[in-house]
Amino acid sequence: AYYHDNKPGDPRLPHDTPRTVPLEYLDKLGWSIFSVDGPDFESNARDLAKQQGYPLTEE
């Protein structure tokens, strides 16, 4: 996660900001952080979403 750089322009476009948010801060906010990669990342991501109670609209 990164802090927003508050630069003008389309916020959906990539912004180059070197300020990362420490994982400890995200944990204090109650955020869960998962790494989903590898050859089965799509299946792993679906399984994780189901475990976390997120509805899946595309299967």
Image (tube, grey):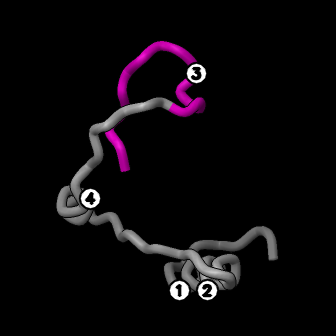
Kind of residue sitting beneath label 3: Asp
At x 19%, y 56%, the residue is 25
- Is the Cβ of the residue at disc 3 closer than 8 Å to that at disc 4? no
In whole angstroms, how far apart are the C-alphas of marks 1 and 4?
A: 20 Å
Image position of 26 with respect to 6: above or below: below
Kind of residue sitting beneath label 1: Gln
The label on residue 26 is: 4
In whole angstroms, how far apart are the C-alphas of marks 4 and 2?
A: 23 Å
* Position in image of residue 31 (x %, y %): 33, 64
Query: Which residue is situated farthest in the top direction here?
Result: 8
Residue of label 2 = 47
Image position of 8 with respect to 23: above or below: above
Residue of label 3 = 10
Q: Is residue 9 left or right of residue 4?
A: right
Quadrant in the picture for residue 53: bottom right
Kind of element beneath mark 3: loop
Residue of label 1 = 51
In whole angstroms, how far apart are the C-alphas of marks 1 and 3?
A: 34 Å
Give the overall secondary structure of the magenta segment.
loop
- The crowd level at tag 4 (other Cα within 10 Å; few <14, some 14-19, many 20+) is few
Kind of element beneath mark 2: helix
> Which of these two is toward me, 36 or 27?
36
Kind of residue sitting beneath label 4: Leu
Mark 1 vs mark 3: in front:
3
At x 43%, y 31%, the residue is 16
- Is the Cβ of the residue at disc 2 closer than 8 Å to that at disc 1? yes
At x 76%, y 68%, the residue is 57
Q: Please give the range of residues in magenta.
A: 1-14
Q: How many marks?
A: 4
- Which of marks 2 and 4 precedes in the sequence? 4
- Which of marks 4 and 3 precedes in the sequence? 3
